[in-house]
Image (tube, grey):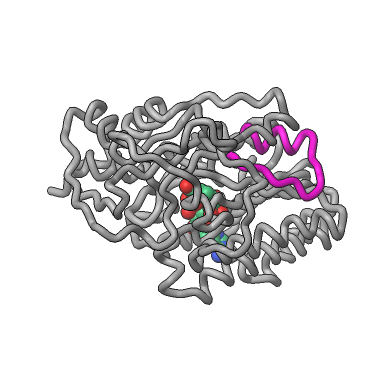
Amino acid sequence: MSVAFVTGSGGLIGSEAVRHFAGLGLDVVGIDNDMRQEFFGEEASTAWNVRRLTDELGEAYSHHSIDIRDRAALGALFGRYGRDVAVVIHTAAQPSHDWAVRDPFTDFDVNAAGTLNVLQSVREHCIDAPVIHCSTNKVYGDRPNSLPLVELATRWEIEPGHPYEQGIREDMSIDACLHSIFGASKVAADVMVQEYGRYFGMKTACFRGGTLTGPAHSATELHGFLGYVMRANMERRTYKIFGYQGKQVRDAIHSSDVVSAFEAFFRNPRSAAVYNLGGGRHSNTSNREAFTLAEQITGQEMITEYVEANRIGDHKWWIGSNEAFQADYPDWKQVYDVPMIMREIYEANVDKWVPAA
Ligand SMILES: NC(=O)c1ccc[n+]([C@@H]2O[C@H](COP(=O)([O-])OP(=O)(O)OC[C@H]3O[C@@H](n4cnc5c(N)ncnc54)[C@H](O)[C@@H]3O)[C@@H](O)[C@H]2O)c1
């Protein structure tokens, strides 16, 4: 028996990973306690996605509503499968800057201690299984804001000819900058994942994601950029723009391009690998450009409100480089770009995201 363990299996990346690894013929064990609903309210619940996985995959998927902070329960589940565990994909997290400030203990317990619980369970029960960890570009804190940027009509851009013109690489320091409480808990997890790779020789990878997106996101104001742009437009909600003239740039990668990268690592794992993974130059947008795309897709104008103050530590410009991953895994191909992603989000939610009566 070959088993894939997926934490956060109801979430955007977790659910995509469940489907993908089940498609490869593995049995999938999913762990998700729908804490996203506790973080962001009913509209962000991922229970619908878990029901869908259970309906679609039948016996190939078994769901466990365990909290990754519960060391004993997590360890017992790993113990039940032991060396049958062929890969662990860790996506469960508290994912928002703004939420983390409200409750730093819970943020740190889920993101940092929860990750340690996963690592130690793997070490004790299935040490050969590759561990794929969803880290984030927020580990670089606000350092990208010190890059020389120029203001264009609809976006911020890096100065032409800069070494990071094709995207920020992993050689950017993560030290001595402002991370936000969320960024700091994710740094702790990222470093611990590397350490279990270096110290214990385990096969571990940190994927430092840019904006991860796709139709399975339970998009909400505090998390899920492109999903929430579409949702706000479709439900006629006011989208709040926080500073930077709405010209802040993010790269965006579709969840299926993310999990195809995970599969590449699973097939040929390394120890203590660290990769930026995002839309890169191929797929990126500013807020303003995303609004225009949403308007073209739905035929309806965005309703926006501009808030002068930017979110603390928010990136003015983030385009990451996938070069390091591509060098190690040359067969990996990115399929989606921003217009394709937004159209797909629209089509998947057109019956669900309608204006309140
Ligand atoms: N979405 C992005 O733009 C983005 C960008 C960079 C990094 N990431 C990282 O990628 C990972 C996945 O992101 P996502 O967008 O799929 O998030 P998501 O919120 O859609 O999914 C995470 C899932 O984990 C579950 N969960 C949370 N706390 C839990 C706990 N204590 N025990 C068990 N389950 C728990 C939630 O209920 C949710 O279903 C996270 O680590 C996130 O920080 C996301």
Farthest left residue?
357
In depth, the one of 179 and 97 nearer the eye is 179
Q: Which residues are magenta?
A: 260-277
Q: Position of residue 318 (x, y in %)?
A: 48, 43
Residue in the picture at 85% in, 60% down: 199
Q: Position of residue 290 (x, y in %)?
A: 32, 35
Q: Nearer the viewer, residue 344 or 163?
A: 163
Which residue is pictured at 79% across the width and 40% down the height?
269
* Quarter placement of the N terminus: top right
The image quarter in which residue 231 lies: top left
Residue 7 in the figure: left or right of residue 156? right
Residue 192 location in percent, x, y? Answer: 72, 62
Relative horizontal placement of residue 82, taking residue 213 as reference (left or right): right
**Residue 92 is drawn in which quadrant?**
bottom right
The quarter of the picture where residue 162 lies is top right
Residue found 67% across the figure and 46% down from its top: 171
Q: How many marks?
A: 0
Q: Who's the residue at 66% across and 43% down the image?
A: 275
On the picture, is 351 further left or further right than 34?
left
The answer to whether residue 32 of the structure is visible from this angle is no
Residue 266 magenta-drawn?
Answer: yes
